[in-house]
Image (cartoon, coloured by chain):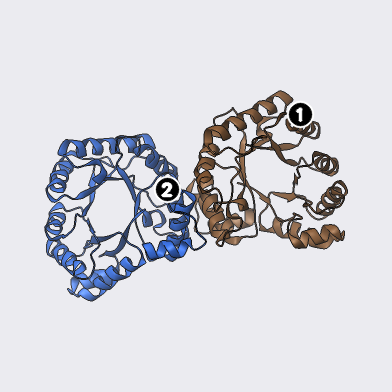
Chain colours: A brown, B blue
Amino acid sequence: MILVGERINGMFRDVGRAIASVDPHPIQEWAQRQEAAGADYLDLNCGPAAEDPIKAMRWLVDTVQAVSSLPLCLDSTNYDVIEAGLERCKRPALINSCPAERPKIERVFPMAKRFGAKVIGLTMDKKGIPKDADSRTALAMEIVAAADEFGVPLEDLWIDPLILPVNVAQDHVVEVLETIRRVKTLSSPPPKTVVGLSNVSQKTVNRSLLDRTFMVMAMAAGLDGAICNVCDEELMNSVATARILLNQDVYADSYLKVFRKRQ
Amino acid sequence: MILVGERINGMFRDVGRAIASVDPHPIQEWAQRQEAAGADYLDLNCGPAAEDPIKAMRWLVDTVQAVSSLPLCLDSTNYDVIEAGLERCKRPALINSCPAERPKIERVFPMAKRFGAKVIGLTMDKKGIPKDADSRTALAMEIVAAADEFGVPLEDLWIDPLILPVNVAQDHVVEVLETIRRVKTLSSPPPKTVVGLSNVSQKTVNRSLLDRTFMVMAMAAGLDGAICNVCDEELMNSVATARILLNQDVYADSYLKVFRKRQ
């Protein structure tokens, strides 16, 4: 599992304040905490409130790279913001994200190619997010074709089947699991699959329990990565245990400790 | 999910002692505790140490039926013991279990038919438990054919794909998950699927964590039931949460409480 730490996002009040006041300390603390907790990537999102998001993204990238050598996941719907971040990244980054919409594909994929970046492609288009696995998979196929067209290696393409809050779209969950399974059949090598995990539990009461239960299901369906709360210890224990059951790590009585140390 | 309480088994020291000393109280306490915790069935197993297992099974059935109206799951490799129990059962029972071996099939299925009992069929034969899902599914098909031959309704057939301890047979787990998926395609209506959950964590350190993580994966694969520790609250919370995510219960913020009350 490739784990992307979700916490450096302007939607969180402490991070939003740090961005507004250009205070590096809370950002760097979250970078180090998430790295210590086992993150493989760090997501960076200026949030909707940033006055000058291009400047904010540049600052976020520099601020995080000063204390962490993890690769970054640049998270914005404004591609000029992502491009500004890519120019500062020392390591190949992950672009979060691109829907199956032609003008956006034409903006994102050549940029990914130019910077050697990876791309998260979303199973949605102008009409929104379809419910069924068939339609989600069809949109994933459009993104796979785009990667091929623009010369982005399929190993660098991550498909996000877009899990929605279970209290809003309960009937989508099984469709997302089925999409994760099917995306693996779209190409050889197949694209990776990734979810924005915390989305499943938005505005619910048992967030961690819902997150880790869905995570285990998605891993059994073949999920490769998640943008998630890597500081949630019970989630990390569930990931370690799922890896053992799926025979992705060798069992030892100390497997939880081994997982934590290796991460 | 149909939950079978595993606790009235002579392998547990307190139950073994109660059987040996013909003391109904520990047995009846476990019956009531498991019923309160949400069991749909109660498994009864005299254990290997019972001196007269036929007498012990009759006593267990009577003792439990005096305090609980739950249907029973009669658990023995000695079919005379199971028959003795079936003669006492007030409600249709579950026979635990029958492998895909001809003489045993010929003993168990006519008995099931006679008593209106359900049968747990194991994906094993004289050669043992095969590793791969293909072979497990082939054995399941033999049991489906036997149910058809002896007139046991397919709704009353439960296939157990035999999960083994993860510290012994780690590569079997994904095969068991795939078998659960495939068994659903064998007939119409399909047989039910069931696992002896605690087996996956035998002699491991993190038993509850392994149990509930495997349970969630198996439920996502379509599992219908489990013989398990229904008094493990974290397991029950995982079951309730998996049901929500799989759209089997309607989401409410209070879903954990609702699940516990209904069970």
Q: Is residue A201 above or below residue A95?
A: below
In depth, the one of B109 and B2 nearer the eye is B2
Query: Quadrant of residue B176 in the image?
Result: top left
Q: Quadrant of the C terminus of chain B?
A: bottom left
User: Which labelled disc corresponds to residue A135?
Assistant: none
Name the chain letter of the residue that bears numbered label 1.
Answer: A
| x then y, percent, for residue A232 | 62, 60
Q: Is residue A47 left or right of residue A154?
A: right
Residue in the picture at 16% in, 49% down: B116
Query: Quadrant of residue A37 in the image?
Result: bottom right
| x then y, percent, for residue A193 | 60, 39
Q: Give the alpha-carbon distance from disc 2 to disc 1, as whole Å.
A: 41 Å
- Label 2: which secondary element: helix
Name the chain letter of the residue that bears numbered label 2.
Answer: B
Q: Which residue is mark 2?
A: B218
In depth, the one of A133 and B228 nearer the eye is A133
Q: Is residue A172 left or right of residue A74?
A: left
Residue in the picture at 33% in, 68% down: B36
From where the camera sits, is residue A29 visible?
Answer: no
User: Mark 2: few, some, or many residues within 10 Å (few <14, many ≥20)?
Assistant: many
Residue in the picture at 78% in, 32% down: A107
In depth, the one of A30 and A245 nearer the eye is A30
- Label 1: which secondary element: helix
| x then y, percent, for residue A19 | 83, 57
| x then y, percent, for residue A122 | 65, 38
In depth, the one of B158 and A3 nearer the eye is B158
User: Which labelled disc corresponds to residue A106?
Assistant: 1
Q: Is residue A39 left or right of residue B145?
A: right
Outermost front residue = A127
Which amino acid type is marked by label 1? Answer: Glu
Query: Quadrant of residue A187 in the image?
Result: top right
Which amino acid type is marked by label 2? Answer: Ala
